[in-house]
Amino acid sequence: MKVLHIITGLEHGGAESALFRLITYQNNAVEQIVVSMMSMGIYGERLEAAGIKVFALNMSRGTVSFSGLFKLWRIIRKNKPDIIQTWMYHADLIGGIDARFAGCTNIAWSIHNFNIDKGVATNSTRWTAKMCALVSGWVPKKIISCSARSAVVHQKIGYSQEKFVVIPLGYDLEKCKRNEIARRNIRSSWNIDPHGIVLGCVARWDPYKDHKNLLTAFAKVSSEWPWVYCVLVGPGMDKDNKELADLIKKSGAKADQIILMGSSEDIPAVMSAIDLHILSSLGEAFPNVVCEAMACGTPCIVTDVGDASVIVGQTGWVVPPADSEALASAMLLALNGMTEATAWKKRSADCRKHILDNFSMKRMFDTYYDTWKTMLSNP
């Protein structure tokens, strides 16, 4: 089976990470090709290093060029894939329609978004999602959502209901696990005592991530726990971000208790170094970072977005989005729980077991593969 994947871009992001994990999972039954509508990004080089053929159309963000569409059409015609799997709204819409004109009918869309409300999603994202809804009865055979709640949200705006398949994301538990050496080294670089308490948030600088909510809640917590730190990790989470600096100042949080790490290529090491991970987002479909944290034995507090509550299960805390009072209360509950060492150690072990039992990489790949086979057997 030959599968050609079309994705909006290959920079940092949850969908990009999921695509990378899926197609680098060892299975000789599938030949896989990737087309990025924009640049190669960080994942393009990694995919090529893994032996995957990658094409970049080099279209600018938010624009579509005739030359880019023609290049995609030629790639599809030349490679003759059995399945075309698209990733994210713009690739679903533009890539899906282009694939149709190239003669391919075995098209599967994928959805990795949850909140497309006005004021949260951009106008471009909202418009593209609505256009996808209009053509969802014609373009794809299947619509794969990484989140059950996200599937419901999209069906409500007009996506073809009978085409949905929910496939939770999967993780390689051998690569994503606790590393005590990394924990000591990273904490040393932060100048934090090995026994100090560290809360963390791994998320790029983006309105969806609602860092204002996190910082406001942490300001309340730090007034009661002055020896607790908060580490912010991700693209844009550094001292050069003036908007972030202003947000920290306005939140009332103490600057000496906040560490800005910037981007990291070793997320398991970061998750090993922190004691509690916070997801403060306004909208997510299936937050990768929660699974990655839990796989490393790091308990989580999450806002009730997408399938975050399903991922956490009984191992963590779930609060409403954009509610800093509730978030601060959950942080205090968790911090008090850390004082019971035996119970906290069990919670940590339960986190990893929950991911192992429910969100393995094998389960994700097998379900995608079965979906593709079903598409081929139903012309």
Image (cartoon, rainbow, N blue to C red):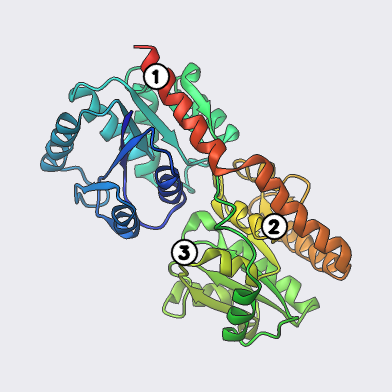
List the residue tagged with mark 1.
375
Q: Are marks 3 and 2 in contact (CB under 8 Å)?
A: no
Above or below, comparing residue 76 to residue 373 in the picture: below
Q: Amino acid at mark 2?
A: Cys
- Describe residue 306's horizontal placement relative to residue 54 as left or right: right
Q: Is residue 353 visible?
A: yes
Look at discs 1 and 2 and give the one toward the viewer: 1
Q: Residue at x 82, y 68 (%)?
A: 338
In the foreground, 139 or 189: 189
Q: Residue at x 66, y 62 (%)?
A: 277
Q: Residue at x 80, y 57 (%)?
A: 347
Look at discs 1 and 3 and give the one toward the viewer: 1
Q: Are marks 1 and 3 in contact (CB under 8 Å)?
A: no
Q: Amino acid at mark 3?
A: Trp
Q: Quadrant of residue 178?
A: bottom right
Is disc 3 placed on a helix, strand or loop? loop
Which label was assigned to residue 205? Answer: 3
Image coordinates of residue 6 in percent, x first then y, are 30, 39
Q: CA distance from mark 3 to mark 2?
A: 20 Å
Dot 1 or dot 2: first in sequence order is: 2
In the foreground, 323 or 347: 347
Q: Label 3 crowding class (10 Å Cα cut-off): few <14, some 14-19, many 20+?
A: many
In the foreground, 121 or 46: 46
Q: CA distance from mark 1 to mark 2?
A: 37 Å
In the foreground, 228 or 39: 39
